[in-house]
């Protein structure tokens, strides 16, 4: 075992996490922060959540935190996990354990006190690091060396680790895209390819979660290229990936000054027409909102060109700001590199920040007053007037609006 120190980490001093460690790390029991928080702190990356491991069994965890005035929620108590809420901050606390039988997410476990055994049951060496309340980092599986080399490596036999949960194939690539440098670990890559048939056993919801995280990772482009070459990407997408489009979307997001968005990137990777969005919806069990965004991205993006604001304003009015941005960005990505430095594309993408679409100024009563009867004729008149108002570039003066209303009413009014 090697050791390092994280004693300067702010979250170890005078925080809800420090108070939790103080309750658990005493009277014969030990508690440490484990996993992603340790990895990210050592890499100087953002730490968003903290997981705690302890030698105390779940009932003792509940007893201690409740006595300290914290809230205990038995979110996964059969597997040793209790969520502890302190001042609104949730922390997952898991008792040290060994997997007696492993079959995906439904492993049988027994609790123990062996930190090395607990580390060895995890997936990758960089995720098996733990840090105590004094800032000492404990490494039982070579995680520090792999972290320094930016190498994502399975703990022990990669084939065995994957057979325990086939989602680890996707996690291998996701962590490489997030934290790895260079080519993926060859032993891990070979094991992933050999075990790819096991991907069919995974729930679509779990695949969706990992894939969207992978798409947002800093080194997603070369990682997706390796997955594609290895035959590990098409099974998720159900079609040939557009790797160039995905790479361009990353550049477009940066050029437009928008945050990385996995839905933008999924659209660039796998949606050319609306039917592609339907396929991804089914294969990945996307949310309705994600599906609607992808379907909109696949609808008519090829008609968008940076040739002035009038057509763009009409599109923004019809789609709303979010759908408009989605469609413009995918059109821009597919115009890259010709449109790379084109200020017209930038202006097109920035239109929602410069212009708020007005509300249609005419109501049903305006047409009834002009002799249009209720029913289909009224709907047709309103539609005709709205289309004319859009085509006129949203005039706001009363004379133009009245002229549009009169013309539409005359078009559908009974003779």
Image (tube, rainbow, N blue to C red):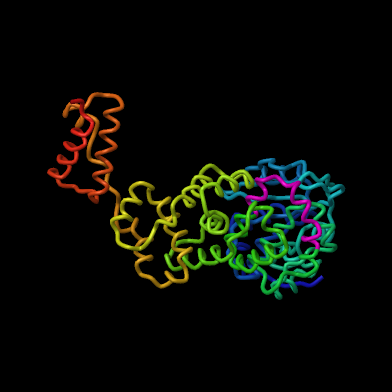
Image quarter in which the N terminus is found: bottom right
Which of 161/329 is in front? 329
Is residue 282 placed above or below 156 in the rendered structure?
A: above
Residue at 15% from the left image edge and 41% from the top image edge: 403
Q: Work out whether residue 128 can be spotted.
A: yes
Left or right: residue 140 compared with residue 407? right
- Residue 185 lies, in percent from the top left, at 75, 70
Q: Main secondary structure of the magenta part?
A: helix
Decide whether residue 200 is among the magenta residues.
yes
Residue at the far front in the pictured view = 415
Left or right: 241 as drawn, with respect to 376: right
Q: Position of residue 284 (x, y in %)?
A: 63, 47
Q: Quadrant of the C terminus?
A: top left
Quadrant in which residue 106 is drawn: top right
Q: Is residue 376 located in the magenta-colored stretch of the structure? A: no
Residue 88 locus on image (x, y percent): 55, 47
- In depth, the one of 189 and 154 nearer the eye is 189
Q: Is residue 70 visible?
A: no
When the figure is inspected, residue 135 is found, relative to residue 397, above or below; the finding is: below
Q: How many marks?
A: 0
Q: Residue furthest left?
A: 399
Q: Residue furthest right?
A: 100
For image coordinates 44% across by 52% down, the residue present is: 300
Residue 126 spot, x, y in % from top left: 73, 66
On screen, residue 334 versus residue 106, left or right, reads left
Question: Which residue occupies 43% across, 65% down?
Answer: 257
When the figure is inspected, residue 242 is found, relative to residue 320, above or below; the finding is below
Q: Is residue 280 above or below residue 348?
A: above
Residue appearing at x 44%, y 68% in the figure = 255
What residue occupies the far top of the structure in this picture?
Answer: 374
- Report the magenta residues as a range: 191-210
């Amino acid at each position: 075992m090697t050791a390092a120190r994280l004693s300067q980490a702010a979250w170890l001093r005078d925080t809800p996490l420090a108070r939790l460690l103080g309750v658990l790390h005493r009277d014969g029991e030990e508690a440490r922060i484990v996993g992603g928080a340790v990895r990210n702190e050592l890499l100087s990356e953002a730490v968003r959540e903290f997981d705690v491991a302890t030698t105390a069994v779940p009932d003792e965890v509940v007893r201690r935190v409740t006595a300290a005035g914290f809230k205990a929620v038995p979110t996964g108590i059969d597997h040793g996990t209790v969520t502890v809420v302190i001042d609104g901050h949730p922390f997952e606390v898991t008792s040290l354990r060994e997997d007696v039988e492993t079959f995906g997410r439904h492993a049988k476990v027994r609790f123990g006190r062996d930190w090395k055994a607990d580390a060895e049951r995890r997936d990758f060496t960089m995720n098996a690091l733990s840090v105590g309340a004094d800032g000492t980092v404990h490494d039982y599986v070579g995680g520090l060396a792999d972290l320094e080399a930016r190498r994502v490596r399975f703990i022990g036999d990669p084939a065995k680790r994957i057979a325990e949960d086939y989602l680890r194939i996707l996690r291998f690539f996701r962590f490489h895209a997030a934290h790895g440098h260079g080519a993926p670990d060859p032993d891990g890559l070979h094991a992933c390819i050999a075990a790819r048939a096991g991907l069919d056993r995974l729930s679509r919801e779990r695949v969706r979660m990992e894939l969207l995280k992978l798409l947002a990772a800093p080194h997603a482009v070369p990682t997706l290229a390796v997955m594609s070459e290895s035959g590990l990407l098409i099974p998720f997408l159900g079609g040939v990936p557009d790797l160039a489009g995905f790479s361009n979307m990353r550049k477009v997001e940066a050029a437009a000054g928008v945050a990385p968005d996995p839905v933008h990137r999924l659209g660039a990777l796998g949606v050319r027409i609306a039917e592609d969005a339907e396929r991804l919806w089914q294969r990945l069990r996307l949310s309705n909102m994600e599906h609607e965004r992808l379907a909109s991205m696949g609808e008519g993006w090829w008609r968008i060109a940076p040739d002035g604001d009038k057509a763009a304003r009409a599109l923004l009015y019809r789609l709303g700001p979010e759908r408009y941005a989605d469609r413009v960005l995918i059109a821009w990505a597919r115009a890259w590199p010709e449109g790379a430095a084109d200020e017209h594309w930038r202006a097109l993408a920035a239109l929602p920040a410069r212009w708020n679409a007005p509300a249609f100024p005419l109501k049903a009563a305006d047409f009834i007053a002009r002799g249009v009867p209720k029913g289909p004729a009224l709907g047709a008149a309103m539609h005709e007037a709205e289309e004319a108002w859009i085509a006129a570039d949203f005039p706001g003066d009363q004379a133009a609006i009245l002229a549009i209303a009169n013309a539409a009413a005359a078009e559908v009014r009974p003779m």
